[in-house]
Image (cartoon, grey):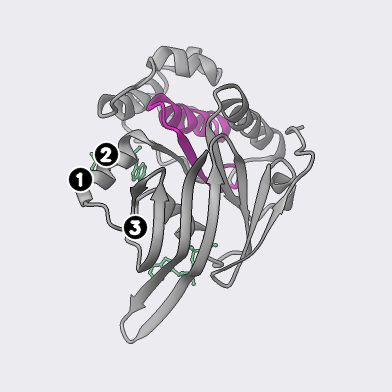
Amino acid sequence: DILLRAKNLRKQYQMGEVTVDALKDASFEIYEGEFIVVLGPSGSGKSTMLNLIGGMDTITSGELYYRDQSLHGASEKELTFYRRNTVGFVFQFYNLMPNLTAYENVKLSVEIAKNPLKVEDVLREVGLEDRADHFPSQMSGGQQQRVSLARAIAKNPEILLCDEPTGALDLATGLQVLKLLRKFNKEYKKTVIIITHNGEIAKMADRVFYIKDGKLSRIEQNEKPLPPE
Ligand code: ADP
Ligand code: ADP
C-alpha cells in the first residue's frame, strides 16, 4: 500500500526580500515497509523534505498525503497527533535531554504516545539495558544515538525519519546504528527514510531518491539492497 504520496510538493523560505526554493515540485510515492535513502549534497533540500514528511514544517504548495490524510491541509492539532504517533525522528546529534537518563529520555516520548512500547523492552532491543540510568554525557556517541533510536521506536511509529543518523559516528559505530534501523524495517515492517550524503548508505536502500538544488531529480530502485556490514 502507498503510505506517503507527494504531488508538486514545494517549500519556500522567505529571508527578508529573498525567497529560497528549498524544495521544488517534488512528486513521489513511498510504500509501506520501504527502506528509502534520500541522497544529495549539503543544502540540496533533504532536511526540508524530511521535515515536511514529519509534519514539522509548513508546506508552501502542493500536496502531501499520509495514507488518505492530507498533511498540507491538516490543522496544528492533527499534525501534533501525527508527529506523536505516526512518525519517529532520529537526528545527527541525538537531541537527547542532557539532564535526563537514557530511561527517562525514552520514557518522555512514550508518555504522550497513543500506543507505545515498554521502555525496558526497547532499551534491550538497542542493547542498552545496562545503560538505563546513565546520562547522555556518560555515554559514547553510538550509545547516545541508540538511546535516540530507542526514543523514536518506543512511540511505536509507522515511519522512522532519520536525518544523517550516522553523520557524527565513526564507521563501525555507524554500522551498528544502521543494522538496528534495518532490523526495525525488516522485522517490524516499518518504513524507514534516511537522509544522507553518504553514498555507501544508499546501497542498503530499496530505493534511492536523489536530490539536487531542491529538485528530486531521480529515483532509483536497488535490485539487491546490501545489508549493513
Ligand atoms: P540539506 O538537508 O540537503 O542540507 P536543507 O533542506 O537543510 O538542505 O536546505 C535547503 C535549502 O533551504 C538551503 O539553501 C538552506 O539554506 C535553505 N533553508 C533551510 N532551512 C531554512 C530556513 N529555516 N530558513 C531559510 N532557509 C532555509
Ligand atoms: P509537544 O508539542 O507535546 O512537545 P510535538 O508535537 O512538538 O509535541 O512533538 C511530538 C513528537 O515529535 C515528540 O514525541 C518528538 O519525538 C517528536 N519531535 C518533534 N519535533 C522534534 C524535535 N525538534 N526534536 C525531537 N523530537 C521532535
Mark number for residue 57? 3
Q: Is residue 72 magenta?
A: no
Mark number for residue 226? none
Mark number for residue 81? 2
Residue 159: x %, y % from top left: 47, 37
Q: Which residues are magenta?
A: 138-167
Q: Is residue 164 magenta?
A: yes
Question: In the rendered image of this protein, does residue 190 appear above or below residue 16?
Answer: above
Q: Write the residue at 28% across / 47% down.
A: 79
Give ligand 2's quarter of the image.
top left
Q: Which of the marked residues, 2 or 3, is nearer the chain's N terminus? A: 3
Q: Write the residue at 42% across / 21% down.
A: 134
Classify mark 1: helix, strand or loop.
helix
Q: Write the residue at 32% across / 41% down.
A: 82
> Which residue occupies the extreme bottom position in the image?
17
Label 1 crowding class (10 Å Cα cut-off): few <14, some 14-19, many 20+? few
